[in-house]
Amino acid sequence: NTKSVEERRDWADRVWASLQARLNPTDRVTILAGQKYRENLVEWISKHGCRVEVPMEGIGIGEQLQWLTQWSIRIAHPSAQSSDLSRFYGALHRLEGGLGGKRLLGQCTARHGWPAQGVYFFFEPGETRSGLDAPRVVRIGTHGVSRGSRATLWNRLRTHRGTTAGHGNHRGSVFRLHVGAALAARDESLRVASWGKGQHAPADVRAAERALEQRVSAHIGAMEVLWVAVPDEPGPENNRAFLERNLIGLLAGSRSPVDPPSEQWLGRHSPLEGIRHSGLWNLDHIHCECSPQALDVLDRYIASTLGE
């Protein structure tokens, strides 16, 4: 930090001369050093063909130290979370095979044979598991967790998707609300002061929000979805609520997610720290500790869904 610009550049050149012989063009390089250390190195590494990640970019020194402490603990003492996560994704892989693949939400209709009740899992283009060429779940949800609710799985998914014409109502879908807020934060031209305000809005307000609603519909419609049938009575203690709460907690991690979002993930623009930190389009339950029974319950319902 006390070096001049020229001295820092000379230092980076010497580091690169030593580093390049150790790197293959397909390697991924994670830099945990500050801006002045990496400013003249990133371009060299990128030109070599490597993917460069700076996971602590843009966060304060206190958060950086916290991030390093959390990950050093994980490296020194691997927890059961990684094992549970592998089991979770293994279960979804079995579910996907039995259902004949994920479904692109934008192309789904009521005629696709949805169960009346279930839990859904969203996958977003470009989002993969850490160190794996496999898609990661970006949202888990369900419906009808209030007593007496008549909501169905398809009605919930249709509300998230919006209409076939690209319209939608973020006041009826917290998923749409979060995606829209992130889009508006990333693109100032989409911002509308009324977004997320109130349970209802008059026609002129909805008209002003239309462009953002359409962008939300396009973004969510490009996601793929898996579902598992969970037929039980509506209520906050039903098995759908149990699975939603615990599986969100598993993916969010007790301290930080095992599978963090990519640098390009839209959710990094969210005004909500919980979304940015967890890598999920969920806010509720991200601090929940996953019950040891949750994956057993999931396995049972997957077997039932697939007629096993």
Image (cartoon, rainbow, N blue to C red):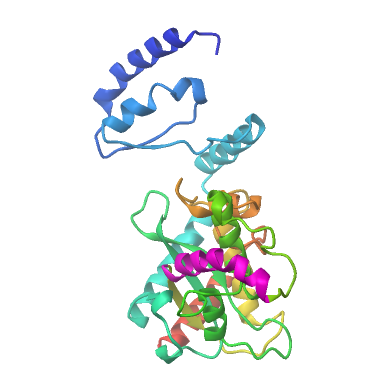
The residue drawn where x is 47% and y is 79% is: 227
Residue 20 pos. (x, y %): 27, 24
Is 105 contained in the magenta span? no
Name the image quarter holding the C terminus.
Answer: bottom left
Name the image quarter holding the N terminus.
Answer: top right
Residue 253 pos. (x, y %): 58, 54
Is 211 contained in the magenta span? yes
Q: Is residue 272 above or below residue 23?
A: below
Give the extent of the magenta segment: 203-222
The residue drawn where x is 34% and y is 76% is: 101
Residue that protrudes farthest toward the front in the picture: 204
The residue drawn where x is 50% and y is 54% is: 266
Q: Main secondary structure of the magenta part?
A: helix
Residue 150 lies in quadrant? bottom right
Q: Is residue 23 above or below residue 223?
A: above
Q: Which residue is at the front of the view, 43 or 135?
A: 43
